[in-house]
């Protein structure tokens, strides 16, 4: 098969993470066109993807091109549904940047349209493909920590968008910081520890920042019986960029025989509480009995691997696409359940009954 011909829908900030991934697999695919209505961004798009890439103002024009086999949707959240429906109608395979959609009803429409059209729907939840996050997944899956009973996941970032930005709109975003970025942690926890049984949530809106919440905390009970604490703070000035900053992202997991953590500025570390598991001691070293020992990992980014696996799947080659739309729907469902909890002040059980327009 020749190179897969890609149309990218959107030329905003996240394109800076997708473009290098395409550059690394030029023998497998070619980005032939980009939809970006803001002409001020066109020079940057060409700098990222090459001077020959064709630029269009309307994403529907790119979807309709005969020489586009698949589309990569990096548009604002409120356009994920209509762009996916349009792509399915034109029989184009879809990769959509997280979050998949603003609510479960939109997810279901996207899944149904792609199923009926016979095209694939993949969501770029990059943490599942990132080497350092995979290192923690391998620790958990090894059984070295014993029965898992506690998870803590944090996201810290200073997010300030200008007046008029779609990110400041609750309607455009599908909520606030939880739907926009704590979905990274929700999705990762579903991948690490299985499905949620129920959630409760509290949020705080800081109006000068955005209409949706700037701070959110979710307390969850997993179907496994483990407890989970997930939080996002879009107001902090500390995000791991400076030597004494707090971390940008943190995952801490505790089990009956050990614990481990991932910290974005450091990597993945494991500590064994005893030497009862000889295989674990051999794998992580005796230093893991005296404190946290670093777990080696690869260097590839999540976007690089996700896009590479997606393109290989389109070529009919063996691939490891692990974020289908049908799977990732569950991440949006947890976020939607959290919003319901914050609104009504009580715990919400999963699965939820989707409500159109919610």
Image: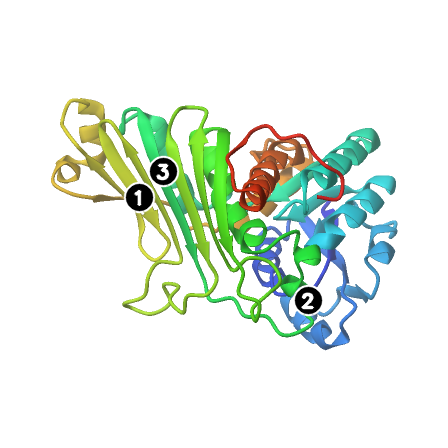
Q: Quadrant of residue 52?
A: bottom right
User: Residue 157 placed where, x, y %?
Assistant: 45, 62
User: Residue 183 placed where, x, y %?
Assistant: 54, 46
Q: Residue at x 76, y 57 (%)?
A: 32
Q: Earlier in the sequence, mark 3 or mark 2?
A: 2
User: Residue 92 placed where, x, y %?
Assistant: 80, 42
Circle 1 residues within 10 Å: few <14, some 14–19, many ≥20: many
Q: Which mark is residue 151?
A: 3
Q: Would you say 225 lies left or right of 69 here?
A: left
Q: Would you say 250 lies left or right of 213 here?
A: left
Q: Which mark is residue 261?
A: 1
Classify the position of the C terminus by image quarter.
top right
What is the CA distance from the residue labelled 1 to the residue labelled 3?
10 Å
Q: Secondary structure at mark 2?
A: loop
User: Which residue is labeled 2 in the image?
Assistant: 50
Q: Secondary structure at mark 3?
A: strand
Residue 56 vertical placement versus 327 (above, below): below
**Whether residue 7 can be seen here:** no
Q: Earlier in the sequence, mark 1 or mark 3?
A: 3
């Amino acid at each position: 098969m020749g190179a897969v011909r890609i149309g990218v829908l959107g030329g905003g900030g996240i394109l800076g993470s997708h473009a290098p991934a395409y550059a690394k697999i030029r023998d497998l695919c070619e980005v032939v066109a980009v939809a970006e209505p803001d002409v001020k961004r066109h020079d940057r798009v060409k700098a990222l993807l090459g001077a020959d890439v064709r630029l269009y103002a309307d994403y529907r024009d790119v979807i309709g091109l005969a020489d586009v086999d698949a589309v990569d949707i990096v548009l604002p959240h409120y356009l994920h549904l209509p762009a996916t429906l349009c792509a399915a109608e034109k029989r184009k395979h879809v990769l959509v940047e997280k979050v998949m959609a603003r609510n479960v009803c939109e997810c279901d429409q996207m899944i149904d349209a792609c199923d009926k059209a016979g095209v694939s729907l993949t969501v770029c939840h990059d943490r599942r493909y990132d080497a350092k996050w995979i290192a923690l997944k391998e620790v958990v899956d090894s059984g070295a920590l014993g029965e898992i009973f506690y998870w803590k996941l944090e996201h810290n970032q200073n997010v300030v968008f200008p007046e008029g930005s779609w990110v400041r709109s609750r309607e455009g975003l599908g909520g606030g910081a939880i739907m926009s970025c704590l979905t990274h942690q929700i999705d990762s926890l579903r991948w690490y520890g299985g499905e949620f049984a129920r959630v409760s949530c509290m949020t705080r809106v800081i109006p000068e920042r955005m209409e949706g919440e700037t701070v959110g905390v979710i307390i969850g009970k997993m179907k496994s019986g483990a407890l989970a604490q997930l939080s996002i703070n879009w107001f902090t000035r500390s995000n791991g960029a400076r030597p004494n900053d707090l971390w940008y992202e943190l995952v801490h997991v505790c089990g009956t025989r050990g614990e481990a953590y991932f910290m974005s500025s450091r990597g993945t570390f494991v500590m064994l509480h005893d030497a009862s598991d000889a295989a674990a001691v051999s794998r992580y070293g005796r230093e893991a009995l005296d404190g946290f020992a670093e777990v080696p990992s690869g260097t590839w980014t999540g976007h690089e691997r996700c896009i590479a696996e997606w393109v290989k799947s389109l070529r009919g080659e063996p691939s490891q696409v692990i974020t289908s739309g049908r799977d990732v729907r569950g991440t949006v469902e947890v976020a939607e359940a959290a919003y319901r909890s914050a609104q009504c002040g009580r715990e919400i059980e999963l699965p939820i009954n989707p409500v159109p327009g919610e």
